[in-house]
Image: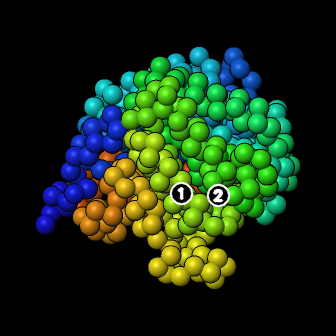
Amino acid sequence: MSRSQSALFSPLTIGALPLAHRVILAPLTRNRAAPSKKHPHTYVPGALNAEYYAQRTTRGGLLISEGTAVNLKGAGVPGIPGLFTEEQIEGWTQVTDAVHAKGGLIVAQLWHAGRTTHSSVSSLPPQSSSAVPITDSAFQVRNDAADLMEPQPFETPLEMTCEDIKRVQTDYVEAAKNALRAGFDGIEIHAANGYLIDQFHHSNVNRRDDAYGGDIWRRSRFTIELAQLIGEAIGLDRVGVRLAPFGYFNQTRGDEREAQWTYLCSELSRLGVAYVHLIEPRFDEIRSEQEKLATLEQKDGLSEAQISLKPYRAALGKTPCIVAGGYNPQNCWDGIERGEHDAIAFGRYFCSNGDLVDRLRDDKPLYHYNRSRFYGPFADQEIGYTVHPEQKEQ
């Protein structure tokens, strides 16, 4: 069978979104939004970002935006766009117009960094489920001048009150409404990778003993409530959720992982969200695939059979499942054919191959990605983003 006949290139409907194929742009932080001249500590997408997303657009293809802040306190990293000012909404409209002009679809990934931010960047103290700081790494980013700042310890976040939680949930709802105003076709709730929502999931971070902590059900409450609230505002058929059952990033080491995340999957499916986006156990932002799998076995005591997305996929029932994490031209075919998942989100290879969909369909070789140009800001923002000089030399 030729690659073009693979189920990867068959149509799929997820919620309100009719897709022509199942190759999806994963949400990728690139730190290329421009500093606002109106609102301090905020960043705005523009023409360069519109070009980047348009390069990766295909007719009927789905793009998931980079993590997009729902408020100022949740941003705290230079170059990260938001969806909480009129200026940002206008900037994102350039992006969605460019995608729609080529027949594509795009959803906004809504994001709050929680305890991973720093007041030196955002001007505001970080907040989290509990007053538990990150201690296994340091906070270090590039500033607006593209200089790498000196590393400094993460701050101890403020524990969110129930009133804080309601305010942040309201910010998410408003950002979702703003996303549709900006022309997005839907939103994805970023509930993974150790950011704010995931900080409620993990028992080593969430030390609460109230309605939002103490057991798997209460640690899941923030996420389930939020999906329902956003669904009421824009329609659940335009709401996706990203989860990382095996995530370690940002010092997430929660217990009862299988019980916690199968419960989340079953509840989100019961709600009727458009899709759930799961990150493969092999993927890690720091470790190699081999190191990550070995750590899951040796430190978490998981068997080979337990290191799998299968129980979470089963908990989703008929809810469409997007998977991501370590997919390449060699391993992206069989799972789709077996029905183990419904679509695949590619990240790193989409960075270096704007025409990734065509290259996979036509079985053409891929350009390797340049990891050193993943995260800006840079003085030459376009290099490694929309322009790849090394490819001209190959």
Residue corresponding to mark 1: 263
Residue ID at (46%, 71%): 308
| Relative to 320, residue 80 above or below | above
Q: How far from the left and from the top, in percent, is residue 18?
A: 27, 38
Which numbered disc covers residue 216? Answer: 2
Tell me if I can see residue 324 in this picture.
Answer: no
Crowd tier of the residue under label 1, counting other residues whose Cα lies within 10 Å: few below 14, some 14–19, many 20 or above? some
Residue 15 sits in which quadrant? top left
Q: How far from the left and from the top, in percent, is residue 13?
A: 28, 42
Which numbered disc covers residue 4? Answer: none
- In this rendering, the count of numbered labels is 2
Q: How far from the left and from the top, in percent, is residue 1?
A: 13, 66
* 67 relative to 205 in the view: left or right: left
Residue ID at (33%, 34%): 16
Position of the C terminus, as image quadrant, is: bottom left
| Relative to 99, residue 242 above or below | below
Residue ID at (47%, 54%): 266
- Helix, strand or loop at label 1? It is helix
Q: How far from the left and from the top, in percent, is residue 225?
A: 59, 39
Query: Type of residue at label 1?
Result: Tyr
* 300 relative to 345 in the view: left or right: right
